[in-house]
Image (tube, helix red, strand yellow):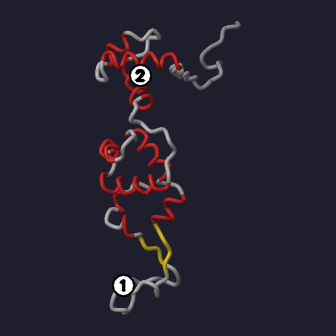
Amino acid sequence: MGFATAASAPSAAPVLRIRLPPAWTPEEDARLERLAREHGFRHWRRVAARMATGRSSSECRGRWRHHLARDVYHRPFTARDDDDLARLYVRHGGRWRDVSRAVHGRTSRVMRRRWREVRDSDAFLSKLWKPISARAHHDAAGTEPSFTCEGGPCLLLTEPLVASFRNLAF
């Protein structure tokens, strides 16, 4: 009589609420910069304890390292930066710390994010592969082509990435 049972209740998907941390204010950035200089750039627990807003040590370190440090560039990537990134990825693979050490002013997080954006783009793929005709690709002696194509143009991997194409994660 008026009681709802489990069988009669509508089945609704559970609601998952994600609480994002509040955005950093310019005052917090200034305070973090001052505290980081006072206490050193490796003592993030001390810095976080003195932040008035209750930020954690990992939040303070991340904000400093990826946004406020003087050696971090916040300029857009150029085509040359993307080419350098492709070469570094071929050399170091997914070891983003090594990739970022080879490029001044870019963190490993930024390099990894950019690689994920670039690797699937049409511009990158068109640089990686270029169409050639079978007759245009002869060896040095001018004899027959060193590969066979079935009716028309073939795709040939461009020179800088030939050796390590298997390392690219597509």
In the picture, the quarter occupied by the N terminus is top right
Q: Can residue 44 be seen in this view?
A: yes
**Percent x, y for residue 25?**
53, 19
User: Can you tell which quarter of the image residue 73 is in?
Assistant: top left
Q: Which residue is drawn at 30% across and 51% down?
A: 92
Q: Is residue 19 visible?
A: no
**How dense is the environment of label 2, judged by Cα within 10 Å: few (below 14), some, or many (20 and up)?**
some
Labelled pair 2, 1 in contact (Cβ < 8 Å) = no
Instruction: Tell me which residue sits at (36%, 43%) in the image.
Output: 104
Give the CA distance from mark 2 to mark 1.
Answer: 57 Å
Tag of residue 57: none
Where residue 10 sits in the image (x, y, percent)?
65, 22
Count of all numbered marks drawn on residues in the image:
2
Query: Which amino acid is tagged 1?
Result: Ser
Give the residue at mark 2. 59
SS label for mark 2: helix
First in residue order: circle 2 vs circle 1? 2
At a point 40% along the width and 30% down the height, the residue shown is: 69
Residue 146, which numbered label? 1
In x, y percent, where is residue 98?
30, 45
- The type of residue carrying mark 2 is Glu
* Label 1 Cα crowd, 10 Å radius (few <14 / some 14-19 / many 20+): few
User: Can you say whether 132 is above or below 125 in the image?
Assistant: below
Quarter of the image with the C terminus in it: bottom left
Q: Name the secondary structure under disc 1.
A: loop
Side (left or right) of 162 relative to 170: left
Quarter of image, res 100: top left
Coordinates of residue 78 in the picture (x, y in percent) = 50, 52
Residue 41 placement, left or right of 109: left
Of residues 118 and 150, the one nearer the viewer is 118
Asked where in the image residue 31 lies, by quadrant, the reply is: top left
In front here: 145 or 38?
38
